Amino acid sequence: MSEEREIKEEQLRAVRTGHGANCSSIGSVINTLFATATVGAAVFAAVVAALKREQVKVAGKDRT
Amino acid sequence: MIVRYESWGAWVKLETQAAIVALDRDGVRALGLDGGRAWDGESTRESAPIEVHMAVTARCGAGCEGCYIDARPDGIEPPREALERELDALADAGVFTVAFGGGEPTTRDDLDVLAEAAMARGITPVLTTSGLGLTDARVEKLRRFAQVNVSYDGPGETYAMVRGFDASAAAERAIERLAAAGIRVGANVVLTRASFPRLDETLARAKSLGACEAQLLRYKPAGRAASIEYLARRLSSEQARSLGPTLRRLATTVCAAGDFNVRIDCALVPFLSADETIAKDPDALARWGIFGCEAAGALAAFTVDGRVAPCSFARSSGLHATSLGSHAGDPELARWRAHVAAPPEPCASCSLRAVCKGGCKVVASFVKGVHGPDPECPRVVAAAGERAA
């Protein structure tokens, strides 16, 4: 595992959870909007943890 | 994770969990990266879509009354090689997710190959199906998809009131089969005046069959649904206004255990303007990555004849799908983005503007004949004073 990165929660502008699988219009998970602060914080904490650990690849024309 | 640079930072698709994250520049730097050309000066390069809806066939025998592409049993079906070239274009543009649809995509016998082809390019494949004729053999071909959604508007007559025939049992069997096979399965629920009152029952049923998610879809006047019947089938003003409280209730019932999510589609976002609590806190919507009209923005559609459209319901542009990288120069796509950038009132002063992006232009074009504010948005209705409950 690489050294942990210093990712901070305030650097996350938005988190879209789930894959969604609709082929006609774009969807967004909405029940998280009504979740308790504890549940919301847990989601963001899990995302930050993944950002600290996952291997990085760059997509598109800039891809590596 | 897969990072795609944007002028404001980067979109990041995580690989150990199902999430896409918008990370600011400092966050991207913390990953040890630099946005390079995307961050040069006041870069305003148009962002490519992060999700593309790809029609892989126009063939479908279901005959749903409201089919948005007017799919038929003898619809055309592009060869796999053509679709693989389109997937190449998605990879070049840095698209994260491709949703295969149609027509009925499971009429193809190469979906497993197409899913592999997407994954090989770093793109997450998902799929929508009616579930009709979904045999165990066909289920096996869907194992590589990150999620499969089955069209399921409700049990029995509720389904029939939306689609014109009752195939709810087949859809229910499909959800069960997919779940039993260990494939993540969701339900696509079209909200009409008739299906909306039974939403709680529909979602509870879908969950009991093994669905992990429901995506609520606004009924849209495209394809066979672009008829006078649309006006009778669309949600009533009162139903539209009650979307916020309805979602709040679902969050505490069917979603309460944490094993079931509810999604809303882009076209439902304007209805949230009637909910005082939500309208007062647009930052919360933005933080949870709620997307309103992202047509020609974060979303694009590839039509079955290989053209780029702002979304699946919109007329296609002149741009060929394999030229997605040139999307910024296409005048039709640019027209959609320009409207979002500078919407007229009452959208211009709406607290939800940055998220909603003016509501559904497909509805506006059909109902009002103009590419303008969504005429069914409660705020637009109030401003115009034109629609009674």
Image (cartoon, coloured by chain):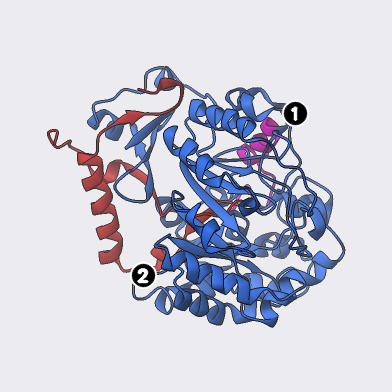
Classify residue A56 by image quadrant.
top left
Q: Nearer the viewer, residue B354 or B267?
A: B267
What's under tag 1, amino acid-wise? Gly
Q: Relative to B62, say whether B80 is above or below.
A: above
Mark 1 / mark 2, whichever is N-terminal:
2
Gap between marks 1 and 2, in whole Å? 43 Å
Q: In the rendering, what colour is chain A?
A: red
Classify residue B179 by image quadrant.
bottom left
Q: Nearer the viewer, residue A40 or B353?
A: A40
**Which residue is identified by label 2?**
B259
Q: Nearer the viewer, residue A6 or B255?
A: B255
Subunit under mark 2: B
The question of residue B290 being in magenta is answered with no
Q: In the rendering, what colour is chain B?
A: blue
Where is residue B98? Give x, y as percent: 53, 42
> Residue B318 shows which numbered tag?
1
Q: In the rendered image, is residue B212 in sight? A: no
Q: Is residue B246 left or right of residue B288?
A: right
What's under tag 2, amino acid-wise? Asp
> Residue B255 shows which numbered tag?
none
Q: Which residues are magenta?
A: B333-351
Secondary structure beneath dot 1 equals: loop
Q: Relative to B364, say whether B82 is above or below.
A: above
Where is residue B205? Give x, y as percent: 51, 79
The residue positioned 47% from the left and 75% from the top of the image is B209
The question of residue B337 being in magenta is answered with yes
The answer to whether marks 1 and 2 sit on the same chain is yes
Where is residue B103? Give x, y as percent: 70, 52
Mark 1: give few (<14), some (14-19) or many (20+) Cα within 10 Å. few
Q: Is residue B225 left or right of residue B256?
A: right
Q: Relative to B164, say whether B222 is above or below.
A: above
